[in-house]
Image: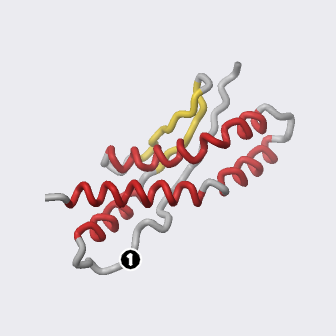
Amino acid sequence: MKNIAIILMLMAGAAHAQDAAPSADPVDDQIVVIGEKLKTWKGGVTKENGRLMCRTKESTGDKQLDAIRCGGMLTCIEPLEPRIDKLMSSDVSRLEKRDKFNAMLAGTKPCLDEYEDAAIARLAAERTKS
């Protein structure tokens, strides 16, 4: 079966970084730092040999942060895999496939935000332990 490449570019800068002055809480400060670094991550999800894979195109320079982004993408896109496969193997035009695919992905934003918020909070707490 022909591999279908599914590219999802998330230029994430989403709502994880806050434009706030340093707080008295080092965990909150670390959350801001992590959010800012995640803005630089670029990558996507592809399907290779029947398996969803995350590929980082521009790393944050921090493997743990890259893993947060990839983990969120894989977790939130995996439930859509059967629908994506069906769409990609359909006879609809390339433009219609792209539009339908983008509409499916738009629905993953709440999942991505929830996943990343929890992962960032855990990592920030871990990094501020003394």
Q: Which residue is mark 1?
A: 19
Relative placement, left or right, of 23 versus 100 is left
Residue located at (78% from left, 38% from top): 87
The percent position of residue 80, horizontal first and vertical second, equals 67, 42
Which residue occupies the foreground of this view, 110 or 99? 110
Which residue occupies the foreground of this view, 40 or 125? 125
Relative placement, left or right, of 92 versus 124 is right
Q: Does residue 25 lie above or below 95 as drawn?
A: below
Amino acid at pointer 1: Asp
Residue located at (72% from left, 54% from top): 103
Residue at the farthest top position? 1
Residue located at (34% from left, 60% from top): 34
Q: Does residue 20 lie above or below 128 as drawn?
A: below
Q: Does residue 31 lie above or below 108 as drawn?
A: below
The percent position of residue 106, horizontal first and vertical second, equals 66, 57
Residue at the farthest right position? 91
Residue at the farthest left position? 130
- Report the quarter where the C terminus lies: bottom left
Residue at the farthest bottom position? 21
Colour basis: secondary structure
The percent position of residue 54, horizontal first and vertical second, equals 50, 38
Q: Does residue 121 lie above or below 84 as drawn?
A: below
The percent position of residue 51, horizontal first and vertical second, equals 58, 28
Relative placement, left or right, of 12 versus 126 is right
Residue located at (42% from left, 47% from top): 58
Assign a secondary structure to mark 1: loop
